[in-house]
Amino acid sequence: MSDRKVSWHANPSTPSFKLPPGAVDAHCHVFGPTAEFPLSPKAKYTPQDAGPDMLFALRDRLGISRNIIVQASCHGTDNAATLNAIAKSRGKARGVAVVDLAISDFELERLHDGGIRAVRFNFLKRLVDEAPKDKFLEISRRILPLGWHTVVYFEADILEEMRSFLDAIPTLVIIDHMGRPDVTRHPDGPEMGAFRSLLDSREDIWTKVTCPDRLDPRGPPWNDFARFASPLVSDYQDRVVWGTDWPHPNMEDAVPDDGDLVDMIPRIAPTADLQRKLLIENPMRLYWPEEATLRGIVPATD
Ligand code: 0GY
């Protein structure tokens, strides 16, 4: 067990930025606890346990109100650890599943009842063995009646070959971590141009302005990341969400301080209006739509 990695900060700082009440961490994970929820035999990394109690302690410490728990690839297509964390949150978490391509409708409904609202398709070869686009599209068609959306994780160098697949997804789409651009390049260069043209192609393509630690090789204070993320937050203000990415899978060599991650927010979303959309209105609209309408967080639509 000694090779199990710790990829999170043991004692994150208290952020200077005070999150508004109701802020959602729209991208985080749990690992285990593995005594109850073992890692997948196909896992490409073997982290130490980082279960719901730890996640919710961090949530409270940072001033976050709710979590969107994304099934981590080390748990494969068994979403039990994610469902367990959602159940323990007492309504303060919802989730994104990774599903077996032969999943039954009954199982999809069971996931819905457990708080799942999206599936994730992962195209990173270091994380998954296969990413069959035709089968993924079939799943996206099947989740449409549940009102779910599709989360897609890929790196910028394959965006062009991803375009026809992304164009064909029938649900709302969220691209993880801004499509993982090389942030040492110019934010107005061809790579971001291609990403913006994807966002411009459909009103229902969203992105997560997440992972400065993962994307910015120069490290804190992550100035290059900020140059990429802040124009997206203002130009696509109704379809961006933020998250910590805790427990930062595979980041054991450059573990971020989660307090610093919160302090990035006013740098990429400098006004109270942008912060409210990024942290509350947008994720609530996606993950708790009924409550968002009932509580007047988003205007009711006809
Ligand atoms: C992330 C990024 C990574 C890992 C996973 O599911 C996962 O294992 O998402 C990564 O290693 O880039 O979004 O957490």
Image (tube, grey):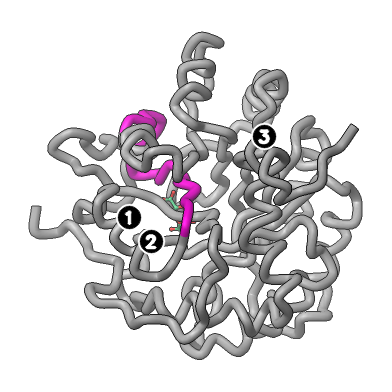
2 and 1 marks in contact (CB < 8 Å): yes
| Residue type, label 1 | Phe
* Label whose residue precedes the other's in the sequence (1 or 3): 1
| CA gap, disc 2 and disc 1 | 5 Å
| CA gap, disc 2 and disc 3 | 23 Å
Inspect this view and state whether residue 161 appears. Answer: no
| Residue type, label 3 | Glu
2 and 3 marks in contact (CB < 8 Å): no
Q: Position of residue 117 (x, y in %)?
A: 58, 33
| CA gap, disc 1 and disc 3 | 24 Å
Q: Is residue 220 above or below residue 240?
A: below
Task: Categorize mark 3 by other alpha carbons within 10 Å: few (<14), some (14-19), many (20+).
Answer: some
- Mark 3 C-beta closer than 8 Å to ligand 1: no
Q: Which residue is mark 2?
A: 59
Q: Is residue 122 above or below residue 47?
A: above
Task: Give, as a single range, the part of the protein colored magenta.
Answer: 65-80
Q: Position of residue 122 (x, y in %)?
A: 54, 44
What residue lies at 65% left-to-right and 31% top-to-bottom?
148
Q: Is residue 262 above or below residue 49?
A: below
What residue lies at 79% left-to-right and 30% top-to-bottom?
170
Q: Which residue is mark 3?
A: 290
Q: Would you say residue 295 sits in the magenta stretch? A: no
Q: Which residue is mark 1?
A: 56
